[in-house]
Amino acid sequence: MPKLDVHIAASVERTGKEYREVHEWIDDEEKKYERHDFSKVLQNADMFREKYGEEAAQEYVYHLVDDLKCRFGKQMTAHQANIDDCIKYFTG
């Protein structure tokens, strides 16, 4: 998944603000899995909206989407490499 500085740079590019508090909260090592739980996205977005405004809530969602793309992208790349190897093996 993207590192903290990558998330912050993306926020700055989108909004002109870091939203460091949002990104640090999500990526807290002890609670990382809990805080990336998509079933709590509305609840957590509301928390950020109340605390920092609508833009912060959106940055929270962007963080999750970026992590999702990164994590699944790595898996899909590895999976595709395995498929390609199998096709090569069985088709010559």
Image: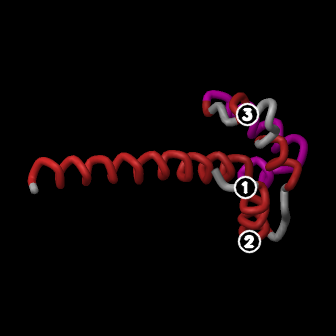
Front: mark 1 or 3: 1
Residue at x 74%, y 35% (from the top left corner): 32
Q: Nearer the viewer, mark 2 or mark 1?
A: 1
In this view, the mark in front (3 or 2): 3
Which element carries disc 3, helix, strand or loop? Answer: helix
Crowding at dot 3, Cα within 10 Å, few <14 / some 14-19 / many 20+, comes out as: some
- The answer to whether 87 is drawn above or below residue 36 in the figure is below
Q: Kindly report the distance in space between the C-alpha atoms of the residues bearing marks 3 and 2.
A: 24 Å
Q: How many marks?
A: 3
Mark 1: amino acid: Lys
Q: Residue at x 25, y 52 (%)?
A: 85
Label 1: which secondary element: loop
Question: How many other residues sit within 10 Å of disc 2, few (<14), some (14-19) or many (≥20)?
Answer: few
Badge 1 is on which residue?
3
Instruction: Find the magenta span and give its range.
Output: 39-58
The one of 65 and 75 positioned closer to us in this rendering: 75
Q: Earlier in the sequence, mark 3 or mark 2?
A: 2
- Near-viewer residue (65 or 56): 65
Label annotation for residue 13: 2
Q: Which mark is residue 35?
A: 3
Labelled disc at residue 28: none
Q: Earlier in the sequence, mark 1 or mark 3?
A: 1
What SS does tag 2 mark?
helix
Q: Amino acid at mark 2?
A: Glu
- Cα gap from disc 1 to disc 3, whole angstroms: 15 Å
- Asked if labels 2 and 3 touch by Cβ distance under 8 angstroms, the answer is no
Q: Which amino acid type corresponds to the residue marked 3 in the rendered image?
A: Arg
Quadrant showing the C terminus? bottom left
* Other residues around mark 1 within 10 Å, as few (<14) / some (14–19) / many (≥20): few
Q: Give left or right: position of 18 versus 33.
A: right
Q: Residue at horizontal 73%, vertical 71%?
A: 13
